[in-house]
């Protein structure tokens, strides 16, 4: 069964410091991995994805994520956090084993990122 | 930039009433989805829709739920007889041949 784990409910970081939001996954085939961000009273906003290729993927707003197949992880990172990055972050996985573009996303529970001035 | 839109933003209904949540996906997208997020919980898949039929549905998507694409632009989720536990934020999403799904701002459904 597919699953995603985000082990931290909340991550606190000082503005200007690097941040990491952790995600591990479990799928049957090769994973398609995604990060989304949710601001208060807003929908989910796509940040970045890993499908294949380079293990380090770059996304919106200076975020990047590192795919590690041996550790089944896809941690979200940013070199220098901003107060405006404070939001709820969701990791999601789609199993590539099943063909078709309509496969559902399985989401983690979310990690609240709080960036302090 | 094109985006998914949803109406209404907030719907309050009484238990047992029917509700229809509406979505306008991104115009050239082919795949459509509904997800829900109960307050404080994770985002859960409800249903996917492609080529005018349901592709996959979750256990949550029972006979009380239905989806429809009544014209070339709208995608609706109907709950026939709402229950208290249907209170949640409902998100519509769409995607093209790529892999990422684009989400609307959500409809907050409150069942009293």
Image (cartoon, grey):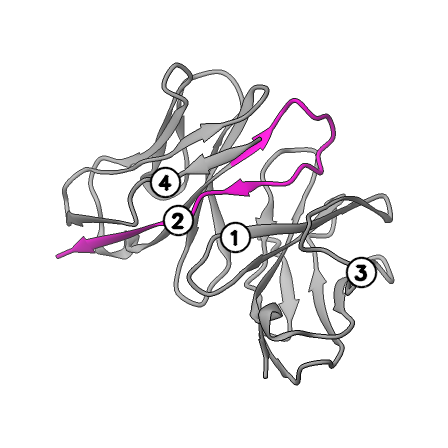
Q: In the rendered structure, the residue with mark 4 lies on which chain?
A: A
- What residue appears at the point 22 percent right and 50 percent down from the top-left corner? A82
Do the residues bearing badges 4 and 2 touch, measured as CB atoms within 8 Å? yes
Q: Which residue is mark 2?
A: A110
Residue A74 percent coordinates (x, y): 39, 29
Q: Residue at x 76, y 43 (%)?
A: B30
Using the numbered discs, state the Cα–Cα distance from disc 1 to disc 2 in whole angstroms: 9 Å
Classify 10 Å Cα crowding around label 4: few (below 14), some (14-19), many (20 and above).
Answer: many
Above or below B27: residue B71: below
Quarter of the image where the C terminus of chain A is located: bottom left
Magenta highlight range: A93-117
Residue under pointer 4: A6
Specify which label sits upstream in the sequence, 3 or 1. 1
The image shows residue A76, relative to residue A14, as above or below, that is: above
- Give the CA separation, mark 3 to mark 4: 32 Å
Q: Nearer the viewer, mark 2 or mark 3?
A: 3
Q: Are marks 1 and 2 in contact (CB under 8 Å)?
A: yes
What is the C-alpha distance between the residues marked 3 and 1? 21 Å
Q: Which quarter of the figure has residue A63?
A: top left
Q: Position of residue B63 (x, y in %)?
A: 80, 60
Tell me, for residue B63, which label it has, or none.
3
Circle 1 residues within 10 Å: few <14, some 14–19, many ≥20: many
Inter-mark Cα distance, 2 to 3: 29 Å
């Amino acid at each position: 069964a597919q699953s995603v784990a985000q082990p931290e409910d909340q991550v606190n970081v000082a503005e200007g410091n690097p941040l990491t939001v952790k995600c591990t996954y479990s799928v049957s085939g090769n994973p398609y991995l995604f990060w989304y961000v949710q601001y208060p009273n807003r929908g989910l906003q796509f940040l970045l994805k890993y499908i294949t290729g380079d293990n380090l993927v770059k996304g919106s707003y200076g975020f990047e994520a590192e795919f590690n197949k041996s550790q089944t992880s896809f941690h979200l990172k940013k070199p220098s956090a901003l107060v405006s990055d404070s939001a709820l972050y969701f990791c999601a996985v789609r199993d590539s084993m099943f063909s078709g573009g309509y496969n559902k996303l399985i989401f983690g529970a979310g990690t609240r990122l709080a960036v302090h001035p | 930039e094109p985006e998914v839109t949803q109406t209404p933003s907030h719907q309050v209904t009484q238990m047992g009433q029917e509700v229809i949540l509406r979505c306008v996906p991104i115009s050239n997208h082919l795949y459509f989805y509904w997800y829900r997020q109960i307050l404080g919980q994770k985002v859960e898949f409800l249903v996917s829709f492609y080529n005018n039929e349901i592709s996959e549905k979750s256990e949550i998507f029972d006979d009380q739920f239905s989806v429809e694409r009544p014209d070339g632009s709208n995608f609706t989720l109907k709950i026939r007889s709402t229950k208290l536990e249907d209170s949640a934020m409902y998100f519509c999403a769409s995607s093209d041949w790529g892999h990422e799904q684009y989400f609307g701002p959500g409809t907050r459904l409150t069942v009293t």
